[in-house]
Amino acid sequence: MAGKLSIVATPIGNLEDITFRAIRTLSECDVILAEDTRTTIGLLKHYQIPQKETISFFEGNEERKINFAITLLGMGKHVVLVSESGTPLLSDPGFKLVRSSIAMGINVETIPGPSALVAALTVSGIPTNTFVFLGFLPRKSSNTERLLRETKDGMSKHIRTVIFYESPHRIVKSLHLIKEIFGDVEVAVSRELTKLHEETLRGSVVEVILHFEKISPRGEFTVVFSR
């Protein structure tokens, strides 16, 4: 009998945001594939979930671990995939594992929950009906510029909202590129979502850039803007 692969979302900051179903699934599974094993083991301890076999599964070793995971699933094991935080596969590893599992006829189920993408979008005040998600922007500014220009050229008139993740070291450069390519558009920049110091800056790109010239950016950012 084939096993089951569960894609489990975990909190992005506030530990109260986990679902009952996620806790039950983590309690009942045989093996956990974790992007960051230390974070996941700490999560299990916090919710008083018995320790499980927890295997490192991140971008650098995903290719090597897929066959091992498929073997476990073929043996009838219940395998859970978690990212360091939030929903797996959204700018996190897992796509190839899910695709391989589907090809092998293995049951893949979702245990939905927190996502920085959705959280930032819902508090942005920017249209949410249709959007483009770019994940983490490239490290090189030239590649970021190319991606943003291609995004602008490829967007239909019905899609006006763009979302991406960015680091504190590159956020200002990326905002300048948005201004250069899209103009002084409306933007919402969120950080520390669900945490005590949650903050979303809303305004024009120029206004947000001026803010960061006064106060150095800290933390990981989720940026939403409307062209």
Image (tube, helix red, strand yellow):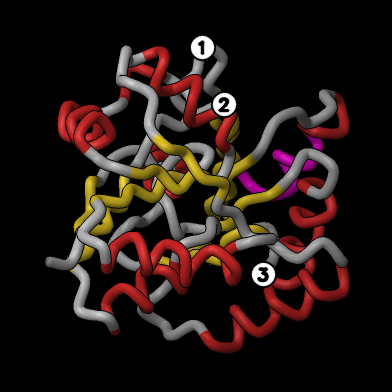
Label 3 belongs to which residue?
182
**Which residue is pictured at 36% across the width and 56% down the height?**
127
In three-dimensional space, the C-alpha distance between marks 2 and 1, rounded to whole angstroms, equals 8 Å
The quarter of the displayed image where residue 212 is located: top right
Residue 131 vertical placement versus 55 (above, below): below
**Which residue is pictured at 47% across the width and 71% down the height?**
67
**Which residue is pictured at 70% across the width and 30% down the height?**
219
Q: What secondary structure predominates along the stretch shown in magenta?
A: helix
Label 2 belongs to which residue?
192
Label whose residue precedes the other's in the sequence (2 or 3): 3
**Residue 210 at what x, y percent from top left?**
81, 36
Q: Using the rendered image of the protein, determine whether residue 26 is visible from the camera's viewpoint.
A: yes
The quarter of the displayed image where residue 147 is located: bottom right
Compared across the picture, whether 189 is left or right of 121 comes to right
**Residue 168 at what x, y percent from top left?**
78, 39
Compared across the picture, whether 28 is left or right of 227 comes to left
Specify start and end residues of the magenta stretch as a single range.
Answer: 203-210
Q: Quadrant of the C terminus?
A: bottom right
In three-dimensional space, the C-alpha distance between marks 3 and 1, rounded to whole angstroms, equals 33 Å
**Residue 82 at what x, y percent from top left?**
42, 45
